Image (spheres, rainbow, N blue to C red):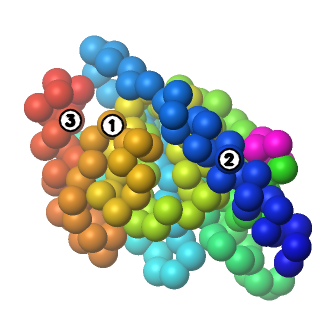
Amino acid sequence: MFYKIISRFFLKKIINKRLSILKEDSSEGKIQTIGIIIDETEKGYKKELLKHIADSGITLKQLKVLTFKDAVKKKGAIEEPGFSGKDISLTGSAKKEEVAAFLATPFDVLVNYFDENKPELLWATTSSKAKFRVGLDSVDYRANNVIVKTDMQETKLFTNELFKYLRILKKL
């Protein structure tokens, strides 16, 4: 309990520092790779979201997904690659190699599909080497380059808006 409080305190300090220096990358190239950070704590929207993205013309080879769960039960497991709060060190680095590899990948677009300002999710967003970030409006505005105003349950509307803005920005 005490360790969790201390680790969240340090994690929030790291996030605030990274958010203040996070800069927008205005790359002009077309999208080749998409990374998705999704919160699978309460309800699973992963399958729906991937289906709608695939329907929009993106192949599953171009996608990589990182899932997050708040608490992992002893019998339950996190889909790989995935992480929980226990997989982040006090210094703000990933303890799992799969998570570190995902965050080191320079995605053309990173989709932040979560609707709460959980420190672990914001840590993953700010740690990513992605060039362009898209997320929901209920998350800290500094974490994303484009914000889509919709609920997490509306995966089809989110993907429609996402691809509409990517076409406007000439990324597709």
Q: Which residue is drawn at 34% across and 16% down?
A: 27
User: Which amino acid is tagged 3?
Assistant: Leu
Q: Name the residue under label 3.
A: 166
Q: Looking at the image, which is closer to me, 126 or 109?
A: 126
Residue 88 appearing in the image? yes
| Mark 2: amino acid | Lys
Q: Which of marks 3 and 1 is nearer the N terminus?
A: 1
Residue 145 got which mark?
1
> Residue 74: percent from the left, percent from the top?
83, 83
Q: In which quarter of the image is residue 2?
A: bottom right
Which tag, 2 or 1, sits closer to the chain's start?
2
Label 2, secondary structure: give it: helix
SS category of the residue bearing label 1: loop
Task: Check contact, mark 3 vs mark 2: CB within 8 A.
Answer: no
Separation of disc 2 and disc 1 at Cα? Answer: 21 Å
> Which corner quadrant holds the C terminus?
top left
Q: Which of marks 2 and 1 is in front?
A: 2
| Relative side of 160 to 41, left or right | left
Secondary structure found at label 3: helix
Side (left or right) of 132 relative to 13: left
First along the sequence among labels 3 and 2: 2
Question: Up-down: is 151 above or below 148?
Answer: below
Percent x, y of residue 55: 23, 54
Residue at image position (71%, 77%) is: 71
User: How many neighbours does mark 3 have within 10 angstroms: few (below 14), some (14-19), or many (20 or more)?
Assistant: some
Mark drawn on residue 13: 2
- Residue 96: in magenta span: yes
Image quarter in which the N terminus is found: bottom right
Q: Which residue is drawn at 61% across and 58% down?
A: 119
Please provide the residue range marked out in magenta.
Answer: 91-98
